[in-house]
C-alpha cells in the first residue's frame, strides 16, 4: 500500500459525506473514509455513500454488520468504487451496541476472526480493522484483536486507545498504540486526541505508528491535513480561513444533494464561535446570507 500522506480522514457518522471527503482529499489526506455503512444495505444494492471517483482518488468504505453472507455480497457490490475496506470494531454508541455492531464485537474474538476472514477472502483490495483498546477496562484485548486481524490477512489496524465504555472520556492511551505497533508486522494507524499538527507529529514520534487518523479535528478543519503535511515537512504551517472552508463546503454540495441539516452541521463545526446564529438559519439561502455577514 502506498499513500501520498501519513494522515487519514476517519470514518465519522453524520460527517464523512461526499463533499467533506473531497475537501479532506483536496487538502492532503492520504486516505479518506465513508461513514460507517451497514453491509445489509449494500447487500441489497442500496448505496448511500455516494462516492465520486473522479474526485475521490483514495477512498475507503467502513463496513458494519455480522452476517457473513451479507458482508460478502456488500463487498462484491461496492468494491469497484473503493480502494480500501475498513471494518468497524470501534463504534461505542448505544445504538450500535444494541444492533451488535461496532465495539461490542471486541467481546467476541472468534466472531471477529470469521468476519475479517470473510472480508479478506471476498476482495483483493486492502482490508483494515478499526478497533479500540477493549470493550471495557475488564477486557483490554487490543493486542489479541490486532493479532487476529494480522493473521487473517488484514493490511492494517487502526487503534483508538480508549475503551467503548469510556467513549470519548478521559485521555487516549497512546502507550497502547506504541505497544500494538511493537507487536504487529502490518501497519498500525494511530487515532485519538489529535487536535493539531503538533499532536499528530507527537503521536508519530511517541508511538512509531505508520499513519495517523484524524477525526474531530478534521471535522472542524479539513485543511488540517495540509497543515500536518506542511508541519512534518518544514516544521511550520499556516492557519486556515474557516469562513472560506464553510463557503467551499456549501459550494461543493450543489452537486451532491446533501441534506440542509447536514450542511448546517458542518458549517457549525467550521465556525463554532458563530454556531448560535448559524443554527437559526432555515435554508441554504439564509445560511449563505448569514455567512456573508460574518
Image: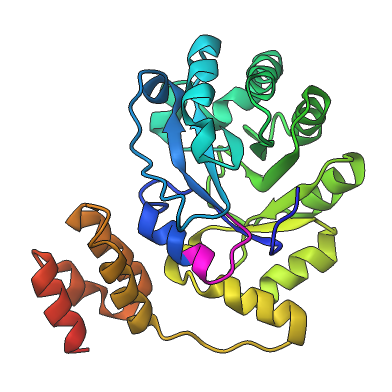
Answer with the quarter of the image where residue 235 lies. bottom right
Instruction: Please state which of residues 6 and 264 is positioned toward the viewer in this rendering.
Output: 6
Residue in the picture at 52% in, 10% down: 69
Horizontal arrangement in the rendering, residue 114 relative to residue 259 (left or right):
right
Residue in the picture at 74% in, 77% down: 232
**Residue 290 versus residue 51 in the image, above or below:** below
Residue in the picture at 57% in, 89% down: 238
Instruction: Please state which of residues 78 and 141 is positioned toward the viewer in this rendering.
Output: 78
Instruction: Please state which of residues 236 and 81 is positioned toward the viewer in this rendering.
Output: 81
Task: Estimate the x, y position of residue 113 in percent, counting from the top left.
Answer: 71, 18
Tell which residue pokes out farthest to the front in this image.
Answer: 54
Is 173 part of what is drawn in magenta? no
Task: Estimate the x, y position of residue 11 in percent, counting from the top left.
Answer: 50, 47
Look at the image and give the residue range highlighted in magenta. 24-31
Q: Is residue 89 visible?
A: no
Q: Is residue 239 visible?
A: yes
**Residue 89 versus residue 57 in the image, above or below:** above
Task: Estimate the x, y position of residue 21 in percent, counting from the top left.
Answer: 45, 57
Residue in the picture at 46% in, 38% down: 36
Is 28 part of what is drawn in magenta? yes
**Residue 267 versus residue 14 in the image, above or below:** below
Horizontal arrangement in the rendering, residue 52 relative to residue 118 (left or right):
left
Image quadrant containing the C terminus: bottom left
**Number of on-image labels:** 0
Q: What colour scheme governs how the chains and residues are painted in the rendered image of this protein?
A: rainbow
Task: Estimate the x, y position of residue 247 in percent, counting from the top left.
Answer: 29, 77
Amino acid at each position: 500500500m502506498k499513500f501520498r500522506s501519513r494522515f487519514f480522514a476517519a470514518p465519522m457518522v453524520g460527517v464523512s459525506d461526499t463533499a467533506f471527503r473531497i475537501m479532506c482529499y483536496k487538502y492532503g489526506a492520504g486516505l479518506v473514509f465513508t461513514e460507517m455503512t451497514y453491509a445489509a444495505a449494500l447487500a441489497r444494492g442500496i448505496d448511500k455513500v455516494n462516492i465520486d471517483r473522479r474526485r475521490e482518488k483514495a477512498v475507503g468504505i467502513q463496513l458494519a454488520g455480522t452476517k457473513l453472507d451479507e458482508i460478502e455480497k456488500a463487498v462484491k457490490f461496492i468494491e469497484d468504487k473503493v480502494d480500501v475496506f475498513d471494518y468497524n470494531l470501534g463504534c461505542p454508541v448505544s445504538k450500535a451496541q444494541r444492533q451488535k455492531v461496532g465495539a461490542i464485537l471486541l467481546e467476541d474474538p472468534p466472531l471477529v476472526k470469521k468476519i475479517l476472514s470473510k472480508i479478506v477472502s471476498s476482495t483483493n483490495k486492502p482490508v483494515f480493522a478499526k478497533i479500540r483498546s477493549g470493550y471495557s477496562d475488564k477486557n483490554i484485548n487490543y493486542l489479541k484483536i490486532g493479532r487476529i486481524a494480522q493473521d487473517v490477512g488484514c493490511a492494517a489496524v487502526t487503534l483508538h486507545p480508549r475503551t467503548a465504555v469510556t467513549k470519548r472520556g478521559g485521555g487516549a492511551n497512546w502507550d497502547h498504540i506504541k505497544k500494538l505497533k511493537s507487536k504487529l508486522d502490518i501497519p498500525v494507524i494511530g487515532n485519538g486526541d489529535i487536535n493539531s499538527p503538533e499532536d499528530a507529529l507527537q503521536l508519530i514520534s511517541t508511538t512509531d505508528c505508520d499513519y495517523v487518523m484524524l477525526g474531530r479535528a478534521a471535522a472542524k478543519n479539513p485543511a488540517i491535513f495540509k497543515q500536518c503535511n506542511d508541519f512534518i515537512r518544514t516544521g511550520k504551517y499556516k492557519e486556515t480561513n474557516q469562513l472560506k472552508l464553510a463557503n467551499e463546503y456549501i459550494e461543493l454540495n450543489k452537486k451532491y444533494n446533501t441534506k440542509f441539516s447536514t450542511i448546517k452541521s458542518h458549517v457549525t463545526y467550521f465556525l463554532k464561535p458563530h454556531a448560535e446564529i448559524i443554527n437559526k438559519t432555515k435554508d441554504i439561502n439564509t445560511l449563505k446570507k448569514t455567512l456573508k455577514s460574518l
